[in-house]
Image: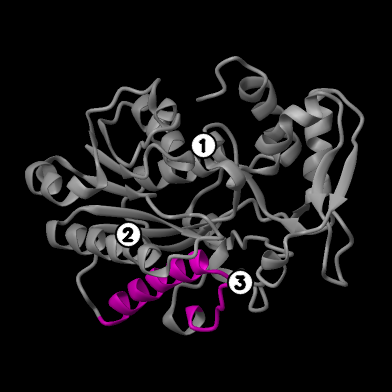
């Protein structure tokens, strides 16, 4: 059995669907709430669904059957403000699961984030050593909470503490694709702007407040969610690979490029309007991210990544334009 925490969320539900398609027995730990998040799991055959507050006793009862935990559960909003809650969910729960896997000889894959790199002044090298991690300065609470756990793992490994049977921390960059609809303001530009672009109206992007970047030329490493799932599946199939790895395409593209890809996919001429960025975001905004993928490639992951033109077209044609947009 594979347990996926956050398995009803965006990336998590895509992972769950593909694991089930590949014949794995999958259990999910997540909150569903009162919204439509449950739809992310509606097409998938699950062996169990457990509420987060019941996870510890569930592991006591079912832990022998668990081979691997894919830990995607987190408070992922970059504007989150309750630091105590964020640390409880993003750090303490992660460390509990790490220790549980180490004690029981289980495998552990966990989601880190490109937000740990902050403004990128020290680059985007996925060096998991304590020295390298100590140089990074995340710009928001979410990024810091993920960074805090990366550093705890690095210290445990350096000190020779018993690790899980396999462990990998995956620094996801800017992911887009189906099943992100419950994320409201944290949806990708594609999901947020699809209906507007499809109707032939202008899409809004934030103005730049950095002298080195024109409006719309802020750049991120945008990665289609299927590529993230392929990385996870590769780790599932390669249980001897450990460490911290970037999960991005290795190519930075502008938000204007992304909007142009969306208009091309819906068959309309591009129209972009630039609006003021909220003041509380301006000092915490990442203007450039680009994953270094050398370590992942050297470890043996050879599959090519999807370009934004390909990924956006797939997203629009197979999901956003359909009555049922879930995977």
For disc 2, the marked residue is: 167
For disc 1, the marked residue is: 182
Report the residue at 66% width, 72% height from top. 120
Question: Image quadrant of residue 29?
Answer: top left
Question: Image quadrant of residue 122?
Answer: bottom right
Q: Is residue 150 magenta?
A: yes
Report the residue at 44% width, 32% height from top. 35
Nearer the observer: mark 1 or 3; the answer is 1
For disc 3, the marked residue is: 118
Quote the CA–CA distance across marks 1 and 3: 26 Å
Question: x%, y% of residue 311?
Answer: 68, 35
Report the residue at 24% width, 66% height from top. 163
Q: Is residue 256 magenta?
A: no
Secondary structure category for the residue under label 3: loop
Quote the CA–CA distance across marks 2 and 1: 29 Å
The boundaries of the magenta stretch are 133-159
């Amino acid at each position: 059995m594979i347990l996926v925490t956050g398995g009803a969320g965006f990336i998590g539900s895509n992972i769950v669907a593909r694991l089930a398609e590949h014949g794995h027995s999958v259990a999910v730990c997540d909150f569903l709430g009162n919204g439509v998040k449950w739809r992310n799991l509606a097409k998938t055959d699950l062996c169990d669904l457990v509420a987060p507050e019941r996870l510890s006793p569930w592991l006591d009862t079912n832990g022998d059957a668990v081979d691997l935990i894919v830990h995607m559960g987190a408070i992922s909003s970059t504007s989150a403000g309750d630091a105590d809650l964020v640390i409880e969910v993003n750090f303490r729960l992660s460390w509990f699961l790490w220790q549980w896997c180490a004690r029981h000889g289980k495998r552990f894959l966990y989601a880190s984030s490109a937000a740990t790199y902050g403004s990128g002044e020290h680059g985007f090298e996925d060096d998991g050593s304590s020295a390298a991690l100590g140089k990074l300065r995340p710009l928001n609470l979410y990024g810091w909470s993920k960074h805090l756990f990366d550093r705890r793992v690095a210290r445990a490994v350096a000190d020779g503490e018993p690790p899980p049977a396999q462990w990998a921390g995956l620094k996801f960059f800017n992911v887009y694709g189906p099943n992100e609809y419950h994320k409201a303001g944290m949806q990708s530009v594609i999901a947020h702007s699809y209906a507007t672009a499809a109707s032939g109206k202008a899409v809004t992007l934030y103005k730049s407040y950095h002298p080195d970047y024109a409006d719309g030329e802020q750049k991120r490493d945008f990665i289609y969610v299927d590529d993230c799932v392929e990385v996870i599946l590769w780790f599932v199939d390669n249980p001897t690979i450990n460490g911290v790895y970037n999960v991005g395409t290795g190519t930075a593209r502008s938000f204007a490029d992304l909007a142009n890809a969306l208009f091309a996919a819906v068959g309309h001429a591009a129209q972009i309007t630039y609006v003021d960025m909220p003041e509380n975001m301006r000092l915490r905004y990442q203007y450039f991210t680009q994953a270094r993928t050398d370590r992942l490639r050297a470890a043996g992951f050879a599959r090519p990544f999807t370009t934004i033109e390909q990924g956006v077209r797939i997203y629009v044609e197979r999901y956003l334009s359909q009555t049922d947009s879930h995977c």
